[in-house]
Amino acid sequence: MQKPVLGGSTNAVEDHSAARSSDFVRNVFSLLERTEYRRCEKGDDLEDIYRLRYKAYHMNGVIPDASDHLIHDDLDDVPNAYKFGIYVDQRLVSTLRIHHVTAETPWSASYQTFGDILQPMLDEGLTFVCMSRLGSDPEWSKQLPQLPYVTMRLAGMACLY
C-alpha cells in the first residue's frame, strides 16, 4: 500500500471532496471581496432592512401578509441592538440583528426565552452575543449559495470581539 504524501491522500474521493471544498471556500472569499457590512441605525437603510426581513419571512411562509411590508419589533429599539445590512455589489442581500447581552443590557430574543438560565450567568459577569432577525433576499439566496456564510460571519466576528 502506498503511503500518502504529507498533506496528501491516496483516496480519489477525498481528493475530489477537498477540491469541491476548496472551490466553495474560494467562492466565499470571492464573495467577501464584493461584500460590505453596514450598521444601520436610521433612515432609508434601516427601513430597507425591515422590508428585507418582511420579504424573506413572507416568501418563506413564516408570516402572513402585512400592509406595511415591514418587520420591526421592540428589540430593534433597545440600546444593545445592532442592526446590519449585508450588501453585495451595493445591493442589500441579507440582514441580521445582534444584541450584546450583559447584566446591564440583557435585552434580547435569547433573554426573553431563556432569561432564567442566562440571568445567573450574567450575574457572574459573563456576556453574550445574541443573533436574531436573520433574513436574506430570496432571489439573491438562489444565486449565491455562500450567502449564509457571509452573513453569519458577522455574528462570529461579534463573538470574537
Image: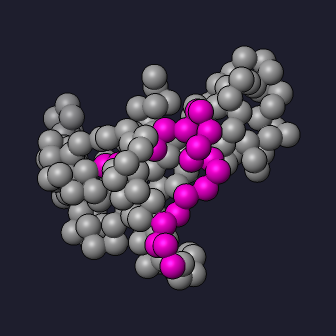
Judging depth in this view, the residue of 26 and 144 nearest the camera is: 144
Judging depth in this view, the residue of 83 and 155 nearest the camera is: 83
Residue at x 15% of width, y 47% of height = 34
Residue at x 57% of width, y 76% of height = 63
Q: Quadrant of residue 111?
A: top right
- Residue found at the far top of this picture: 125
Residue 16 seen in this snapshot: yes
The C terminus, quarter of image: top left
Q: Is residue 114 left or right of residue 139?
A: right
State yes or no: residue 80 in magenta.
yes
Residue at x 45% of width, y 59% of height = 50
Residue 106 at x, y percent in the picture: 71, 33
Q: How many marks?
A: 0
Q: Quadrant of residue 140?
A: bottom left
- Residue found at the far front of this picture: 43
Residue 146 seen in this snapshot: no
Residue 20 at x, y percent in the picture: 20, 57
Provide the residue span drawn in magenta. Answer: 67-86
